[in-house]
Amino acid sequence: MNHNIFGFHPGTTPIHQLTGTTKLIIFLSLTIFGSLSFDLRYLLLLSVVAIGALFVAKIKWTDVRVLVWLVIVFAILNLILIYVFAPQYGTHLFGSKTVLLGSGAYALTFEQLYYEIIVFTKYLFALPLALIFLMTTNPSEFSAGLNKIGISYRVAYAVALALRYIPDIQVEYQTISKVQQARGYDMSKNTSLWHRLKGAVGIMMPLMFTSLEQIDSVSRAMDLRRFGKRKRRTWYYAQKFKTLDWWAIALTSLLIGIELVLLLTNGSRFWYPFK
Amino acid sequence: MEKKNGLSTRSVVAVGIGTAVFIILFKFLAIPTGIANTQINVAQAWLSLIAAIFGPVVGGLVAFIGHALNDAISYGSIWWSWVIADGVFGVLIGLAGKYLHFADGNFTTRKIIGFNLAQLVSNIVAWLVVAPLGDILIYSEPAAKVFTQGAVSTLVNVISTAILGTAVLAIYNRTKVKKNSLEHEA
């Protein structure tokens, strides 16, 4: 059974050595600035950096294969949906129309193709970034990092609790599910929707009540240990910034700086040189 | 009990464990309806219960953190506009629960209607207003596409919360002792 839903693999590469805080800052800032930008040059630069980092982190293809294929299918589906619902969105965005193929409302235009390529490159950099973050960050360091970037330690602790309890609840879920199936609950496509719903409720109810009880007992235990009485708390997994961290943050700042310069010179989030 | 320092311990734990359950339900317990790509989402029913019991802050945090973590694990990238929309849904249901008391042991017909009106409004605000607007503002996606997606998920979420959310709340309330159920005897 896979207890490690996040797929964290310990390692010794430079990216593994970065603190959780650094990785969190890089992940959040690059994904946010990346989603803001519609500049193909910048998105390609980010993709190259992210994919390069994937190799530096020595992430194995077999570990990420399933997720990568899933995201590719999802991305293509999204691109098709955009085309189905707004086949001329590109022309509307860039203010020109260059028909490549066909005619009528669904004519394939160069502008539409260009827009959809931009959307695709967004997956191209976001996925490697997320993979690196998920696979090289110890979940406990992640929560300590959340607190360090200014999020209230209560919320950071709640995230730590969530990460701590996901494997437990997964085991519990599977146990309940098997027990209920042994009692004749069927959730497969072989039965009617009503039976599937009843099956889902049959699994959910026990899970719900044990979890609510767990909330009570864990919060009492934490109260007894005086959780939340002070303004600050320390973290077992708190880490000090090293030279490597500062370099990584400097590189990220440089990337953000480039984005800001591009935004100013383009005058908008888009870059379209073919007018 | 000190209440000034932000979240209470109980709320912190409710967010933590609530999020864990939310993610597991999201990942493992989606009921196929038979229509392609449309699943009845059991996690949303759990979210309604948690928001009704613990209030808007816990509801919003469970939805926000849960959705963001689940996106990261399942799709490799976080789709912020929908994460925010889910957070809004959690807050709204929590607010409704704060005034209408869905979880005090007395789930009358009036409250069932109240809950369903609240979830209808919250779902519409979250998936038909916040999520598509976020898609347009953040991701600059075509309006026709995102509003269609929003409409489909609103419909699915309203129906699944109406069935599962109501069922879950009704069963939860049966385990609670009714308010004012004790009588004073001289």
Image (spheres, coloured by chain):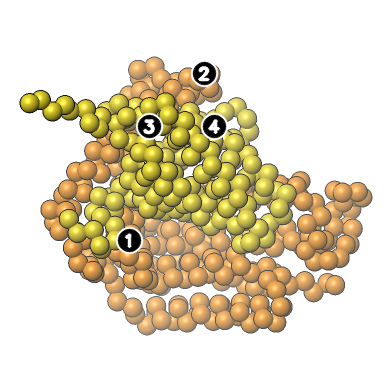
Chain colours: A orange, B yellow
Q: Position of residue B41 (x, y in %)?
A: 49, 36
Q: Is residue B155 visible?
A: yes
Q: Amino acid at mark 1?
A: Ala
Q: How far is mark 1 from mark 2, CA to CA? A: 42 Å
Confirm whether circles 1 and 3 share one chain.
no
Kindly identify which numbered label has been placed on residue A191.
2
Q: Of the residues tagged 1 and 3, which is closer to the observer?
A: 3
Q: Kindly indicate the quadrant of the structure image that contains residue A231.
A: bottom left
Does B19 appear above or below A25? above
Q: Is residue B136 left or right of residue A68?
A: right
Q: How far is mark 4 from mark 1, CA to CA? A: 33 Å
Q: Is residue A58 visible?
A: no
Q: Amino acid at mark 3?
A: Leu
Circles 4 and 2: CB atoms closer than 8 Å = no
Q: Position of residue A203 (x, y in %)?
A: 37, 28
Confirm whether circles 2 and 3 share one chain.
no
Q: Which residue is mark 1?
A: A156
Q: Which residue is mark 4?
A: B159
